[in-house]
Amino acid sequence: MDSQNNTFPRALIWLLGIFLILVMVVYIGDKAFQISKQAKESKEPQKTISISAEGKVKAVPDLAVVNLGVITQGTTAAEVQDQNSKKINQIIDFVKQQGINKEDISTSNFNIYPQYDYRNGKNNITGYQANQTVSIKVRGVDKSTEALGKIIDGATNNGANEVNGVSLSFDDPDNLKEKARENAIERAKQKAQEMARVAGLTLGKVVSVSESNMGGYPVPMADVAYGMGGAGIAQKSISPNIEPGTQDITAQMTVVFEIK
């Protein structure tokens, strides 16, 4: 009787063990099938279409950068430094009076160097020359260039005898660049839809998006430039009429779509 009782639990244990083994076999087999299926699908070429398009945004520059300079000459380095600093400080004071923040005024160049007389095979120092340049940011030129003209005119009347140029650009070019990208992607979608329609295909999801280096940020444009010999510039002058015009900000995007 006891022998029969011991046989039943052992048989039950064996059955449970066989059942667990079968479950494991089925699980492993299913996993192997899934892995094999994924590997096969990954080897199969994906049906895609690649479209490139350019996006463009046209905008009026809102930022002008003026580079003004003072060149002074004298017999000693200390003399030309004092004269040059006096004129530059006078120019900076005038610019601040026009409402330009001090953060938008910076010294971009300062040099003092000797002048030589090379006649008769000699290189005697005959004097010194100082050259100092300041960069001034004038904002809001897309609305009015009146302040820009006043600053150039007033700076020359206050001692600036060198104007290296006026560069027109944008205070926030990244925002314009993003809009150009959005336009490019939208154009790529339209081109892909038309191509798929003509080919009798169905356009699927976007697989990838990339940007070409062909599209760039706006390049500052030099609209005004004066030479060094500023004798005439230092006199009372008429404010230059500067027109900011418009600039194109472009982006070249490539979009890959799935097709069905």
Image: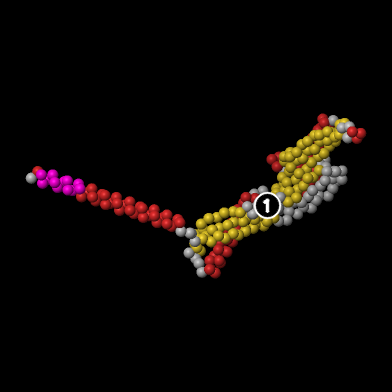
> Percent from the top left, x then y, of residue 187?
59, 61
Identity of the residue drawn at 74% across and 38% down: 107
Identity of the residue drawn at 73% across and 56% down: 245
Query: Of helix, strand and loop, which one carries label 1?
Result: loop
- Write the start and end of the magenta stretch as one range: 3-14
Q: Which residue is mark 1?
A: 218
> Percent from the top left, x then y, of residue 120?
92, 34
Towards the viewer: 170 or 144: 170
Quarter where residue 90 is shown? top right
Decide if residue 59 is on the left or right side of residue 7.
right
Decide if residue 2 is on the left or right side of residue 81.
left
Towards the viewer: 156 or 185: 185
Furthest-left residue in this view:
1
Identity of the residue drawn at 54% across and 58% down: 256
> Percent from the top left, x then y, of residue 78?
82, 30
Residue 7 sits inside the magenta stretch: yes
Quarter where residue 33 is shown? bottom left
Name the colouring of the figure.
Answer: secondary structure
Q: Is residue 109 above or below residue 36?
A: above
The amino acid type found where label 1 is placed reads Pro
Q: Quadrant of the N terminus?
A: top left
Residue 92 seen in this snapshot: no
Towards the viewer: 209 or 165: 209
Query: Majority secondary structure of the magenta segment?
Result: helix
Residue 252 sits inside the magenta stretch: no
Q: Is residue 197 above or below residue 37?
A: below
